[in-house]
Amino acid sequence: MITHKGTKTIQTARLLLRRFTVEDAQAMFDNWASDERVTRFLTWDPHTSVEETKEILSAWCAAYENPDSYHWAMEYDGTVIGGISVVRFYDKRECADLGYCMGYDYWNKGLMTEAAKAVIDFLFTEVGVNRLEIAHAVKNPASGKVAQKCGFTYEGTKREAFKTSSGEFLDIAYHSLLRREWASGRKI
Ligand SMILES: CC(C)(COP(=O)(O)OP(=O)(O)OC[C@H]1O[C@@H](n2cnc3c(N)ncnc32)[C@H](O)[C@@H]1OP(=O)(O)O)[C@@H](O)C(=O)NCCC(=O)NCCS
């Protein structure tokens, strides 16, 4: 059964996962939101001004009023370097879809895997989900690697299921982790 808890602060070995504030705008803009290397496979285009980042952050902060809003800022060495969220929550089937992105300078240090494992543990333990999903462009294998390192199982690929703003159709791979797998130690 689902018991929503909202975005609670989580400490990991190297990261503080906490709510975003509007004061994070400059760091978010500088570290990832304005960088097309980061947004290439995402549903949004790079921000062109810090004002745009502030507007998005205001909306995210307002959404924290809802107990089913899960959106963590990743703070590393006192700097906000990325975010991890539940993109969509399916209460009826006790399932959540995870999404994440992080500044280019911080890639390939295991940081997103560390954040995702902590969020996964929180969602199974505190919120009570039965299933988690991660979807990513096949052309973006680093995202699939994060899912794999968190114990997810590859389920299949939808062909040309996403169109980028530059007009490219992308194949999307789907991964999932079930409560019983997580509980039996597949969380790794
Ligand atoms: C995807 C993303 C979150 C990964 O974060 P990260 O902190 O670099 O992830 P980790 O370091 O925990 O793991 C990345 C793994 O992918 C591997 N990897 C990186 N680039 C790769 C590539 N081109 N092909 C195959 N594997 C790759 C890394 O070697 C690492 O695996 P390892 O630990 O076995 O060496 C980060 O690259 C990002 O923010 N990208 C832009 C936004 C995005 O694409 N978000 C996901 C949308 S679905």
Image: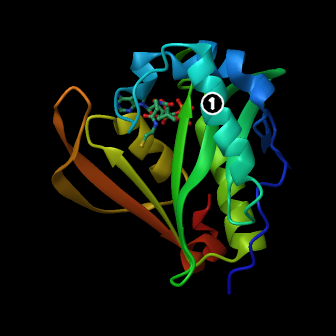
The quarter of the picture where the N terminus appears is bottom right
The quarter of the picture where the C terminus appears is bottom right
- Which secondary structure, mark 1? helix
In the foreground, 23 or 35: 23
Residue 85 against residue 143 in the figure, above or below: below
Residue pictured at 61% horizontal, 12% vertical: 30
Residue 9 screen position, x and y as percent:
85, 49
Residue 79 screen position, x and y as percent:
77, 20
Tell me the quarter of the picture where residue 100 sits. Answer: top right
172 left or right of 141 in image: left
Residue pictured at 54% horizontal, 22% vertical: 33
Residue 124 screen position, x and y as percent:
68, 71
Residue pictured at 68% horizontal, 81% vertical: 2
159 left or right of 85 in image: left
Residue 105 against residue 102 in the figure, above or below: above
The kind of residue on which mark 1 rests is: Glu
Q: Is residue 106 visible?
A: no
Residue 58 screen position, x and y as percent:
70, 37
Tell me the quarter of the picture where residue 77 sits. Answer: top right
- What residue would you read off at disc 1? 55
Residue pictured at 38% horizontal, 39% vertical: 43
10 left or right of 154 in image: right
Residue 134 against residue 53 in the figure, above or below: below
Question: What is the total number of numbered labels drawn onto the structure image?
Answer: 1
